[in-house]
Image (tube, rainbow, N blue to C red):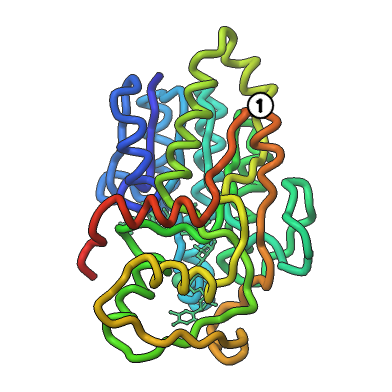
Amino acid sequence: MKILLTGAGGQIGYELLQCLQGRGELLAPGRDRLDLERPDQLRELIRAWRPDVVVNAAAYTAVDQAEREPDAARRVNAAAPAAIGEAARQVGAAVVHFSTDYVFDGRKLSPYEEDDPTGPLNVYGQSKREGEQALLASGARCLLLRTSWVYGLRGRNFLLTVLRLARERDSLRIVADQYGAPTWSRSVAQCCARVLAQAERASDRDEWWALNGGIFHMSAQGRTSWYGFTRSALERMRLPRTPAVHPIASHEYPTPAKRPAYSVLSGARLEQHFGLRMPHWEQSLADCLASGAPDPV
Ligand SMILES: NC(=O)C1=CN([C@@H]2O[C@H](COP(=O)(O)OP(=O)(O)OC[C@H]3O[C@@H](n4cnc5c(N)ncnc54)[C@H](OP(=O)(O)O)[C@@H]3O)[C@@H](O)[C@H]2O)C=CC1
Ligand SMILES: Cc1cn([C@H]2C[C@H](O)[C@@H](COP(=O)(O)OP(=O)(O)O[C@H]3O[C@@H](C)C(=O)[C@@H](O)[C@H]3O)O2)c(=O)[nH]c1=O
Ligand SMILES: [Mg+2]
Protein backbone atom coordinates (compact mmCIF):
# COMPACT_ATOMS: atom_id res chain seq x y z
CA MET A 1 0.00 0.00 0.00
CA LYS A 2 1.36 3.46 -0.94
CA ILE A 3 0.69 5.97 1.85
CA LEU A 4 1.22 9.73 1.66
CA LEU A 5 1.40 11.15 5.20
CA THR A 6 1.19 14.88 5.90
CA GLY A 7 2.06 16.51 9.24
CA ALA A 8 4.57 13.81 10.24
CA GLY A 9 6.26 16.32 12.55
CA GLY A 10 3.08 16.84 14.59
CA GLN A 11 1.79 14.92 17.60
CA ILE A 12 -0.36 12.36 15.78
CA GLY A 13 1.68 12.46 12.56
CA TYR A 14 4.90 11.56 14.37
CA GLU A 15 3.27 8.55 16.04
CA LEU A 16 1.74 7.50 12.71
CA LEU A 17 5.16 7.62 11.12
CA GLN A 18 6.33 5.07 13.72
CA CYS A 19 3.23 2.85 13.32
CA LEU A 20 3.12 2.87 9.52
CA GLN A 21 6.82 2.42 8.82
CA GLY A 22 7.48 -0.82 7.00
CA ARG A 23 3.88 -1.02 5.80
CA GLY A 24 4.51 -0.75 2.10
CA GLU A 25 5.67 2.56 0.67
CA LEU A 26 5.43 5.58 2.93
CA LEU A 27 6.06 9.16 1.79
CA ALA A 28 6.06 11.80 4.53
CA PRO A 29 7.21 15.14 3.11
CA GLY A 30 7.90 17.98 5.54
CA ARG A 31 6.35 21.42 5.29
CA ASP A 32 9.36 22.53 3.18
CA ARG A 33 8.41 20.02 0.47
CA LEU A 34 4.64 20.07 0.88
CA ASP A 35 2.97 23.25 2.13
CA LEU A 36 -0.73 22.78 2.82
CA GLU A 37 -1.26 26.44 2.11
CA ARG A 38 -0.31 25.59 -1.49
CA PRO A 39 -3.20 23.52 -2.92
CA ASP A 40 -1.37 23.34 -6.26
CA GLN A 41 1.54 21.49 -4.58
CA LEU A 42 -0.87 19.08 -2.93
CA ARG A 43 -2.69 18.29 -6.16
CA GLU A 44 0.54 17.88 -8.13
CA LEU A 45 2.09 15.50 -5.62
CA ILE A 46 -1.03 13.33 -5.35
CA ARG A 47 -1.44 13.17 -9.13
CA ALA A 48 2.25 12.38 -9.68
CA TRP A 49 2.86 9.85 -6.87
CA ARG A 50 -0.61 8.25 -6.97
CA PRO A 51 -0.87 7.03 -3.37
CA ASP A 52 -3.45 4.40 -2.36
CA VAL A 53 -4.16 6.38 0.80
CA VAL A 54 -3.51 9.98 1.84
CA VAL A 55 -3.33 10.32 5.63
CA ASN A 56 -3.72 13.99 6.48
CA ALA A 57 -2.37 14.62 9.97
CA ALA A 58 -1.33 18.21 9.24
CA ALA A 59 -3.53 21.01 10.55
CA TYR A 60 -3.61 24.51 11.95
CA THR A 61 -4.12 23.65 15.64
CA ALA A 62 -3.40 26.92 17.51
CA VAL A 63 -6.93 27.43 18.84
CA ASP A 64 -6.56 30.95 20.27
CA GLN A 65 -4.28 32.20 17.47
CA ALA A 66 -6.88 31.08 14.90
CA GLU A 67 -9.22 33.81 16.19
CA ARG A 68 -6.67 36.35 14.90
CA GLU A 69 -5.76 34.39 11.76
CA PRO A 70 -9.03 32.94 10.47
CA ASP A 71 -7.85 32.96 6.86
CA ALA A 72 -4.70 30.96 7.60
CA ALA A 73 -6.72 28.47 9.68
CA ARG A 74 -9.20 28.04 6.80
CA ARG A 75 -6.48 27.59 4.19
CA VAL A 76 -4.91 24.71 6.14
CA ASN A 77 -7.98 23.15 7.77
CA ALA A 78 -10.60 23.62 5.04
CA ALA A 79 -9.06 24.51 1.65
CA ALA A 80 -6.24 21.93 1.89
CA PRO A 81 -8.59 19.01 2.69
CA ALA A 82 -10.76 20.15 -0.24
CA ALA A 83 -7.74 19.99 -2.57
CA ILE A 84 -6.69 16.61 -1.13
CA GLY A 85 -10.22 15.26 -1.69
CA GLU A 86 -10.34 16.50 -5.26
CA ALA A 87 -6.96 15.04 -6.24
CA ALA A 88 -7.59 11.81 -4.32
CA ARG A 89 -10.85 11.23 -6.18
CA GLN A 90 -9.07 11.75 -9.49
CA VAL A 91 -6.39 9.13 -8.79
CA GLY A 92 -8.68 6.75 -6.86
CA ALA A 93 -6.90 7.30 -3.53
CA ALA A 94 -8.67 7.03 -0.19
CA VAL A 95 -8.25 9.77 2.42
CA VAL A 96 -7.85 9.41 6.18
CA HIS A 97 -8.34 12.78 7.86
CA PHE A 98 -8.44 13.94 11.48
CA SER A 99 -10.98 16.22 13.05
CA THR A 100 -11.91 17.45 16.49
CA ASP A 101 -14.41 17.49 19.36
CA TYR A 102 -14.36 21.30 18.94
CA VAL A 103 -16.81 20.94 16.00
CA PHE A 104 -19.51 20.61 18.72
CA ASP A 105 -21.06 23.39 20.81
CA GLY A 106 -20.77 21.46 24.07
CA ARG A 107 -24.39 21.77 25.14
CA LYS A 108 -25.07 18.02 25.11
CA LEU A 109 -24.96 16.13 28.41
CA SER A 110 -24.11 12.68 27.03
CA PRO A 111 -21.36 11.54 24.62
CA TYR A 112 -21.59 13.00 21.13
CA GLU A 113 -22.46 10.57 18.33
CA GLU A 114 -21.04 11.01 14.83
CA ASP A 115 -24.36 12.22 13.41
CA ASP A 116 -25.10 14.78 16.13
CA PRO A 117 -25.44 18.31 14.75
CA THR A 118 -22.24 20.34 14.88
CA GLY A 119 -22.01 23.92 16.09
CA PRO A 120 -18.43 25.09 16.50
CA LEU A 121 -17.83 27.87 19.03
CA ASN A 122 -14.51 29.09 17.62
CA VAL A 123 -12.65 29.70 14.35
CA TYR A 124 -10.53 26.56 14.69
CA GLY A 125 -13.62 24.36 15.18
CA GLN A 126 -15.42 26.09 12.32
CA SER A 127 -12.45 25.63 9.97
CA LYS A 128 -12.18 21.95 10.94
CA ARG A 129 -15.91 21.46 10.27
CA GLU A 130 -15.48 23.08 6.85
CA GLY A 131 -12.65 20.62 6.15
CA GLU A 132 -14.90 17.67 7.07
CA GLN A 133 -17.64 18.94 4.77
CA ALA A 134 -15.22 19.56 1.90
CA LEU A 135 -13.89 16.00 2.11
CA LEU A 136 -17.34 14.45 2.39
CA ALA A 137 -18.44 16.45 -0.66
CA SER A 138 -15.30 15.68 -2.69
CA GLY A 139 -16.43 12.27 -3.83
CA ALA A 140 -13.17 10.71 -2.57
CA ARG A 141 -13.46 7.62 -0.38
CA CYS A 142 -12.69 8.92 3.08
CA LEU A 143 -12.47 8.23 6.76
CA LEU A 144 -12.82 11.21 9.09
CA LEU A 145 -11.48 10.43 12.54
CA ARG A 146 -12.56 12.88 15.23
CA THR A 147 -10.43 12.85 18.34
CA SER A 148 -10.03 15.15 21.37
CA TRP A 149 -7.64 16.79 23.82
CA VAL A 150 -4.55 15.17 22.26
CA TYR A 151 -1.37 15.03 24.34
CA GLY A 152 1.94 13.20 24.36
CA LEU A 153 5.53 13.68 25.42
CA ARG A 154 6.42 15.73 22.36
CA GLY A 155 4.98 18.70 20.55
CA ARG A 156 2.65 21.35 21.92
CA ASN A 157 -0.07 20.12 24.22
CA PHE A 158 -1.80 20.77 27.54
CA LEU A 159 0.09 18.02 29.42
CA LEU A 160 3.52 19.46 28.58
CA THR A 161 2.29 23.01 29.33
CA VAL A 162 1.06 21.96 32.76
CA LEU A 163 4.25 20.02 33.56
CA ARG A 164 6.29 23.10 32.69
CA LEU A 165 4.06 25.39 34.77
CA ALA A 166 4.25 22.92 37.68
CA ARG A 167 8.02 23.39 37.77
CA GLU A 168 7.83 27.18 37.47
CA ARG A 169 4.98 28.05 39.84
CA ASP A 170 3.78 27.44 43.38
CA SER A 171 0.15 27.14 42.34
CA LEU A 172 -1.85 26.48 39.19
CA ARG A 173 -5.37 27.66 38.31
CA ILE A 174 -7.09 25.22 35.95
CA VAL A 175 -10.59 25.28 34.46
CA ALA A 176 -12.83 22.64 35.99
CA ASP A 177 -16.03 23.26 34.01
CA GLN A 178 -14.94 21.97 30.59
CA TYR A 179 -15.34 18.20 30.21
CA GLY A 180 -13.76 15.97 27.60
CA ALA A 181 -11.50 12.98 27.05
CA PRO A 182 -7.73 13.53 27.03
CA THR A 183 -6.34 11.25 24.31
CA TRP A 184 -2.74 10.08 23.89
CA SER A 185 -1.39 10.77 20.39
CA ARG A 186 0.05 7.23 20.27
CA SER A 187 -3.30 5.58 20.97
CA VAL A 188 -4.88 7.49 18.07
CA ALA A 189 -2.06 6.48 15.71
CA GLN A 190 -2.25 2.83 16.77
CA CYS A 191 -6.00 2.69 16.36
CA CYS A 192 -5.79 4.41 12.99
CA ALA A 193 -3.10 1.94 11.86
CA ARG A 194 -5.37 -0.96 12.87
CA VAL A 195 -8.21 0.44 10.78
CA LEU A 196 -5.83 0.81 7.82
CA ALA A 197 -4.69 -2.78 8.30
CA GLN A 198 -8.33 -3.90 8.01
CA ALA A 199 -8.64 -1.94 4.75
CA GLU A 200 -5.43 -3.49 3.44
CA ARG A 201 -6.60 -7.04 4.23
CA ALA A 202 -9.94 -6.57 2.46
CA SER A 203 -10.28 -8.72 -0.67
CA ASP A 204 -12.10 -5.87 -2.43
CA ARG A 205 -10.69 -2.53 -1.29
CA ASP A 206 -13.19 -0.40 -3.20
CA GLU A 207 -16.02 -2.26 -1.54
CA TRP A 208 -14.33 -1.94 1.88
CA TRP A 209 -14.08 1.83 1.57
CA ALA A 210 -17.64 2.11 0.27
CA LEU A 211 -18.92 0.18 3.29
CA ASN A 212 -16.62 1.62 5.94
CA GLY A 213 -16.08 5.24 4.97
CA GLY A 214 -17.49 8.17 6.92
CA ILE A 215 -17.06 9.85 10.28
CA PHE A 216 -15.77 7.97 13.33
CA HIS A 217 -15.10 9.20 16.83
CA MET A 218 -11.68 8.04 18.09
CA SER A 219 -10.94 9.42 21.55
CA ALA A 220 -10.14 7.88 24.91
CA GLN A 221 -12.83 6.25 27.04
CA GLY A 222 -14.05 8.07 30.14
CA ARG A 223 -14.17 11.80 30.80
CA THR A 224 -12.64 14.43 32.98
CA SER A 225 -12.06 18.19 33.14
CA TRP A 226 -8.78 19.99 32.42
CA TYR A 227 -8.52 20.29 36.21
CA GLY A 228 -9.06 16.53 36.69
CA PHE A 229 -6.50 15.77 33.98
CA THR A 230 -3.97 18.07 35.66
CA ARG A 231 -4.50 16.49 39.08
CA SER A 232 -4.11 13.01 37.69
CA ALA A 233 -0.96 13.89 35.74
CA LEU A 234 0.73 15.61 38.68
CA GLU A 235 -0.11 12.77 41.07
CA ARG A 236 1.46 10.30 38.67
CA MET A 237 4.56 12.45 38.06
CA ARG A 238 5.60 12.50 41.74
CA LEU A 239 7.60 15.71 41.26
CA PRO A 240 9.97 16.70 44.07
CA ARG A 241 7.67 19.69 44.66
CA THR A 242 4.04 19.58 43.52
CA PRO A 243 2.22 22.93 43.25
CA ALA A 244 -1.27 23.49 44.62
CA VAL A 245 -3.92 23.11 41.89
CA HIS A 246 -7.01 25.32 42.14
CA PRO A 247 -10.18 24.52 40.17
CA ILE A 248 -11.59 27.61 38.43
CA ALA A 249 -14.51 28.46 36.12
CA SER A 250 -13.90 29.17 32.42
CA HIS A 251 -14.70 32.88 32.88
CA GLU A 252 -11.82 33.09 35.36
CA TYR A 253 -9.40 32.06 32.59
CA PRO A 254 -10.36 34.31 29.67
CA THR A 255 -9.12 33.15 26.26
CA PRO A 256 -9.65 34.58 22.76
CA ALA A 257 -11.42 31.35 21.67
CA LYS A 258 -14.49 30.00 23.42
CA ARG A 259 -14.31 26.26 24.19
CA PRO A 260 -17.14 23.71 24.55
CA ALA A 261 -18.24 22.92 28.12
CA TYR A 262 -18.69 19.26 27.22
CA SER A 263 -17.17 17.43 24.26
CA VAL A 264 -17.00 13.75 25.16
CA LEU A 265 -17.20 11.61 22.00
CA SER A 266 -18.98 8.25 21.90
CA GLY A 267 -16.81 5.33 20.80
CA ALA A 268 -19.79 3.09 19.99
CA ARG A 269 -19.55 3.36 16.20
CA LEU A 270 -15.80 2.64 16.20
CA GLU A 271 -16.43 -0.51 18.21
CA GLN A 272 -19.44 -1.68 16.16
CA HIS A 273 -17.78 -1.11 12.80
CA PHE A 274 -14.18 -2.06 13.41
CA GLY A 275 -14.29 -3.96 16.70
CA LEU A 276 -11.84 -1.42 18.13
CA ARG A 277 -11.97 0.26 21.54
CA MET A 278 -9.74 3.11 22.59
CA PRO A 279 -8.13 2.78 26.05
CA HIS A 280 -9.47 4.70 29.06
CA TRP A 281 -7.83 8.12 29.43
CA GLU A 282 -6.32 7.27 32.84
CA GLN A 283 -4.72 4.08 31.50
CA SER A 284 -3.27 5.97 28.54
CA LEU A 285 -1.97 8.76 30.73
CA ALA A 286 -0.16 6.20 32.91
CA ASP A 287 1.26 4.46 29.81
CA CYS A 288 2.32 7.77 28.27
CA LEU A 289 4.12 9.00 31.39
CA ALA A 290 5.81 5.60 31.73
CA SER A 291 6.96 5.67 28.09
CA GLY A 292 9.82 8.09 28.62
CA ALA A 293 10.93 11.49 29.79
CA PRO A 294 9.10 14.48 28.33
CA ASP A 295 10.98 16.45 25.68
CA PRO A 296 12.65 19.46 27.30
CA VAL A 297 10.43 22.54 26.85
N1 LIG B 1 -4.11 18.60 19.29
C1 LIG B 1 -5.32 18.25 19.68
O1 LIG B 1 -5.67 18.36 20.87
C2 LIG B 1 -6.29 17.68 18.71
C3 LIG B 1 -6.00 17.55 17.38
N2 LIG B 1 -6.95 17.09 16.49
C4 LIG B 1 -6.67 16.98 15.08
O2 LIG B 1 -5.71 15.97 14.89
C5 LIG B 1 -4.85 16.30 13.80
C6 LIG B 1 -3.41 16.26 14.26
O3 LIG B 1 -3.25 17.17 15.35
P1 LIG B 1 -1.87 17.29 16.14
O4 LIG B 1 -1.03 16.11 15.84
O5 LIG B 1 -2.19 17.66 17.52
O6 LIG B 1 -1.27 18.59 15.41
P2 LIG B 1 0.12 19.32 15.67
O7 LIG B 1 -0.19 20.77 15.83
O8 LIG B 1 0.92 18.61 16.68
O9 LIG B 1 0.85 19.08 14.27
C7 LIG B 1 0.34 19.64 13.11
C8 LIG B 1 1.30 19.33 11.96
O10 LIG B 1 0.79 19.99 10.81
C9 LIG B 1 1.86 20.66 10.17
N3 LIG B 1 1.40 21.81 9.41
C10 LIG B 1 0.72 22.88 9.86
N4 LIG B 1 0.52 23.76 8.86
C11 LIG B 1 1.09 23.22 7.75
C12 LIG B 1 1.24 23.63 6.41
N5 LIG B 1 0.77 24.81 5.97
N6 LIG B 1 1.89 22.81 5.55
C13 LIG B 1 2.40 21.64 5.97
N7 LIG B 1 2.31 21.19 7.22
C14 LIG B 1 1.66 21.97 8.11
C15 LIG B 1 2.77 21.08 11.32
O11 LIG B 1 4.03 21.36 10.80
P3 LIG B 1 5.07 22.27 11.63
O12 LIG B 1 5.57 21.37 12.71
O13 LIG B 1 6.06 22.65 10.60
O14 LIG B 1 4.27 23.43 12.19
C16 LIG B 1 2.72 19.84 12.20
O15 LIG B 1 3.62 18.88 11.73
C17 LIG B 1 -5.35 17.65 13.30
O16 LIG B 1 -6.25 17.44 12.25
C18 LIG B 1 -6.07 18.25 14.49
O17 LIG B 1 -7.07 19.16 14.09
C19 LIG B 1 -8.19 16.70 16.92
C20 LIG B 1 -8.53 16.80 18.24
C21 LIG B 1 -7.59 17.26 19.25
C1 LIG C 1 -2.40 26.71 30.56
C2 LIG C 1 -3.74 26.73 31.23
C3 LIG C 1 -4.89 26.47 30.49
N1 LIG C 1 -6.09 26.49 31.08
C4 LIG C 1 -7.31 26.20 30.31
C5 LIG C 1 -7.53 27.00 29.05
C6 LIG C 1 -8.46 26.12 28.26
O1 LIG C 1 -9.80 26.33 28.66
C7 LIG C 1 -8.04 24.71 28.67
C8 LIG C 1 -7.22 23.97 27.61
O2 LIG C 1 -6.19 24.80 27.18
P1 LIG C 1 -5.27 24.56 25.89
O3 LIG C 1 -5.13 25.85 25.19
O4 LIG C 1 -4.04 23.89 26.33
O5 LIG C 1 -6.06 23.53 25.05
P2 LIG C 1 -6.81 23.74 23.66
O6 LIG C 1 -5.96 24.48 22.72
O7 LIG C 1 -8.19 24.24 23.88
O8 LIG C 1 -6.87 22.21 23.20
C9 LIG C 1 -7.61 21.88 22.08
O9 LIG C 1 -6.73 21.82 20.98
C10 LIG C 1 -7.37 21.57 19.74
C11 LIG C 1 -6.31 21.48 18.66
C12 LIG C 1 -8.35 20.46 19.77
O10 LIG C 1 -8.71 19.91 18.73
C13 LIG C 1 -9.08 20.17 21.06
O11 LIG C 1 -9.50 18.82 21.13
C14 LIG C 1 -8.28 20.53 22.28
O12 LIG C 1 -7.28 19.59 22.58
O13 LIG C 1 -7.26 24.86 29.86
C15 LIG C 1 -6.21 26.77 32.46
O14 LIG C 1 -7.33 26.78 33.01
N2 LIG C 1 -5.09 27.03 33.19
C16 LIG C 1 -3.85 27.04 32.63
O15 LIG C 1 -2.85 27.30 33.31
MG1 LIG D 1 -3.95 25.62 22.80
- Most distant residue in the left direction: 296
Q: Is residue 205 left or right of residue 49?
A: right
**Which residue carries the number 1 mark?**
212
* SS type, badge 1: helix
At horizontal 56% and vertical 66% (from top left) the residue drawn is 124
Estimate the x, y position of residue 106 in percent, counting from the top left. 72, 67
**Residue 78 in sight here:** no
At horizontal 39% and vertical 28% (from top left) the residue drawn is 3
Residue 225 sits in quarter? bottom right
In front here: 180 or 215?
A: 180
At horizontal 26% and vertical 61% (from top left) the residue drawn is 294
- Count of numbered tags: 1
- From this view, report whether residue 235 is shown above or below residue 1: below
Quadrant location of the N terminus in the rendered image: top left
In front here: 256 or 110?
A: 110
Q: Amino acid at mark 1?
A: Asn
Estimate the x, y position of residue 144 in percent, counting from the top left. 60, 41
At horizontal 47% and vertical 57% (from top left) the residue drawn is 150
- From this view, report whether residue 196 is shown above or below residue 103: above
Estimate the x, y position of residue 93 in percent, counting from the top left. 51, 25
- From this view, report whether residue 39 is shown above or below residue 67: above
